[in-house]
Amino acid sequence: MNGFQRRLRDMPAQLSHRETRALFIALADEELPADKAKEVRSHLDGCGECQQGWQHYSSTVLRLRQVEKHKAPPALASRVMTRVKRQRRFGLKRLHLMHAQYRLPVEILIPLLIAAAVGAFLVMSAP
């Protein structure tokens, strides 16, 4: 193995865009090990697209951390659990009947739910 191959082997692998964005959560929560955080920051320094994504993500996290927290009323937990238990008993039967009545293919529901989630994220992250 020559010197170039040794240096190439010893160089840290560059993170892809997908890997970098997947680490945004841990980076925002300061849960990344120092070496991995350095890799992410290095990628952000050289990639305008990911840097813009990080700015949107981190500003959204900052806004969410500034939201005042409220404690739920004590009776709410018991009402929610009662409803969950009822849904477990009758939910699947009702879901099957609803599907039969409306005939909406599941293949359409998944992209619609993803589009709604992305739309909600974009609305929340708008300045």
Image: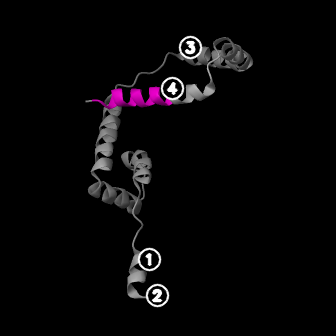
Disc 2 designates what residue? 1
- Dot in front, 1 or 3: 1
Mark 1 belongs to which amino acid?
A: Arg
Main SS of the magenta segment?
helix
User: Disc 1 vs disc 2: Cβ atoms closer than 8 Å?
Assistant: yes
User: Disc 2 vs disc 4: Cβ atoms closer than 8 Å?
Assistant: no
Question: Is residue 61 shown above or below 43?
Answer: above
Residue drawn 33% across and 49% down? 50
In the picture, the disc for residue 112 is 4
Residue 33: x, y in percent? Answer: 42, 58
Whichever of callouts 1 and 2 sits on the residue coming sooner in the sequence is: 2
Q: Secondary structure at mark 4?
A: helix
Whichever of callouts 2 and 4 sits on the residue coming sooner in the sequence is: 2
Q: Is residue 32 left or right of residue 85?
A: left
Label 2 Cα neighbours within 10 Å, binned few <14 / some 14-19 / many ≥20? few
Mark 4 belongs to which amino acid?
A: Leu
- Dot in front, 4 or 3: 4
In the picture, the disc for residue 75 is 3
Marks 4 and 1 sit apart, C-alpha to C-alpha, by 44 Å
Q: Which residues are magenta?
A: 114-126
Disc 1 designates what residue? 9
Residue 4: x, y in percent? Answer: 38, 83
Whichever of callouts 4 and 1 sits on the residue coming sooner in the sequence is: 1
